[in-house]
Amino acid sequence: MNGKKVTFDDIAKYTNFSKTTISRYFNNPDSLTLKNQEIIAQALIDLDYRENKVAKILANGKTEFVGIIIPNLYLHYYAEMLNQILSSYEKFGYKFLVFAANDNEAAERRYIRELLAYNIEGMIVLSHTIPSRELASYNIPIVTIEREDQYTSSVNTDNYMGGVQATSLLYKCACDVLIHINVDVPKGIPAHGRIQGFLDTCREHRIPYELLLKDLGNTYADNQRALLETAGYLERKYEKKRKGIFLANDTYANMLLNALVRLHGSLPEDYRIIGFDNSPISGEAVIPTSTVGQQIDKIADTAMEILVAQMNERKKRRPSVPGSPVHRVITPVLINRDTTRIPAEI
Amino acid sequence: MNGKKVTFDDIAKYTNFSKTTISRYFNNPDSLTLKNQEIIAQALIDLDYRENKVAKILANGKTEFVGIIIPNLYLHYYAEMLNQILSSYEKFGYKFLVFAANDNEAAERRYIRELLAYNIEGMIVLSHTIPSRELASYNIPIVTIEREDQYTSSVNTDNYMGGVQATSLLYKCACDVLIHINVDVPKGIPAHGRIQGFLDTCREHRIPYELLLKDLGNTYADNQRALLETAGYLERKYEKKRKGIFLANDTYANMLLNALVRLHGSLPEDYRIIGFDNSPISGEAVIPTSTVGQQIDKIADTAMEILVAQMNERKKRRPSVPGSPVHRVITPVLINRDTTRIPAEI
């Protein structure tokens, strides 16, 4: 589409800036005023300037591409994680080729093949279907987030600490019994730590507890039905006892809260509720709901740091032999809102 | 990293499949059983097979890249739109380089330059900062979604129709007065249609109405404070009248609903509420809230269809001169939930 090659000289002449200024625009644009940036940007358009990175890639083999495979963007957790990873462009300059896998293992393999065909330098995997052993066999730098990670480097929330934080807060609310509602998360998955953190904290404080691990269904309507049933069960079994309920995520917590508010007009005094994730719903709920917040910005940043270090190693003339996978955990943050009020009489 | 080139012959020998089967795996994988796909996928790993698309690109100039610029992924609307656009890989095969612009005009220009440097074939722009006239001057196929679009092809929700649908439903609820709460959306922006649709419908039915257009702030807390104030204002001004309130989005609708439920223990009989977007919050609210749903899947699909047609045109030996921008509107869908109940006495 473009004709003869436009040089920095041409741009300098056209704008009356020096070549140094033009060069600064390309290497450190924020060192120029916004107005001068705009003048140069307009000149690039007027002159039809095109940098050609594809030619460069062939010359030096560095695509500056990182592949991302996310399970979906429906859950706010994944959307925000992707947002944070994309933002790292400002810091590291890597460009992101993104695929949404939607739990389809065969599709995910095709996406990875496609990414490899474009000579990506590394990959961040948030989806769950492909075993880490297989991921590792692709023999490129990979960091996984919050999934089975035996054979890959990974960054995860300290789920155990999150479970301890949530359970300790409920304990401080002078509850008579603590309940954890979750699905039966297998031990290899980081989120299993929430269950263990709950159990250890209850036992440490010698407080009565109940662990409700069951399939809550795969749709919003199924989840809602399951939690309405659970609410009824708890009302009957623990009548007049103060119930401290730790739910596996904020969506479940909101469903339970809504069921109770619709029944009673407000959250009854004998309930305390906490979720996990600090999703928007926890703040937007009819009663702002306590939760354990994941530091998504730190997780994304740490993942990119590990990945960039591994990618840089590959670019050395004599890369060192890759060592064992690196596993990093990021501490979650307890967010104390209106559903974990400490009773006045205490 | 890989040594000698692995051929289809090598893969066929290794797996005991025919070369035709291997070829089908690459061109139409779903014509094979999942088991056979897995066997071949494993063989590709074992043999360290790498397709090299970068070399192909240099040969034929087709990168199969589409650039996407989104404002953010915080709003569910953008996250779901991105999800749907990414899913179009299955249909069209284009790969997506994604940038989140976060309302930074200078950053956005840098992203576009970066995308052009990778010879993207086309671009989908959802961010708002760069005028469509400038986008058009980049001289590549571009489709914009739900933003100013005078000089670019675009796909938008039929916002006017959405305004009419929402207002008509409130009218059917036998309201005494209809109220629309929004910011003062300029006329060039597609979402302005919601205001016009409200006005025209109120006038057509000769029903009293009030248009509340004001700055509601930029943070969740600001929005919430503004809507709490508005709720107080409406309670005083329209006491004992049935108020039908159409809010610009589901987040605002949820804030108003929460304020009323906290005050009264439930949604009072003299209120009817409807939002816009069918965001998750509308279904997750303490009382499932009526809304106007945007058909995000259709919008994404239509955007890709327009873009692919334009990109294909460019690949012809004699591309026709680009005509005027194409503008398509997608009809929204009214979702009638619990906040727009028609009174029993009617």
Image: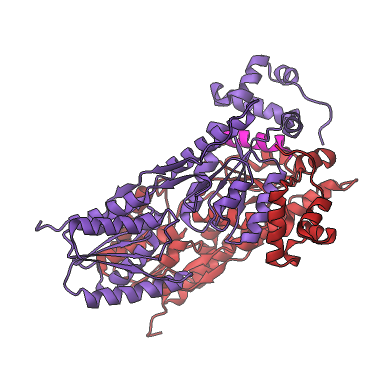
Chain colours: A red, B purple
Q: Toward which corner of the image does residue B211 lie, by quadrant?
A: bottom left
Where is residue B272 shown, x and y percent of the image? 24, 62
The quadrant in which residue B203 appears is bottom left
The residue lying at 84 percent from left, 30 percent from top is B3
Residue A117 included in the magenta stretch of the image? yes
Instruction: Give whichever of A291, B211 is nearer the camera.
Output: B211
Q: Residue at x 56, y 69 (%)?
A: A333
| Side of A250 relative to A18 (left or right) | left
Q: Between B235 and B8, which is closer to the camera in this rendering? A: B235
Name the quarter where the N terminus of chain B is drawn. Answer: top right
Residue A293 in percent (x, y) is at: 54, 65
Residue B58 image position (x, y, % from top left) = 76, 32
Across and down, in percent, residue A217 comes to: 40, 46
Farthest residue toward the right? A318
Q: Is residue B240 above or below residue A140?
A: below
Q: Is residue B54 above or below residue A253?
A: above
Closest to the observer, B113 or A12 = A12
Indicate the quadrant containing the C terminus of chain B: top left, top right, bottom left or bottom right: bottom left
Q: Which stretch did the figure color magenta?
A: A107-119
Residue A264 lies left or right of residue A179; in this view the side is left
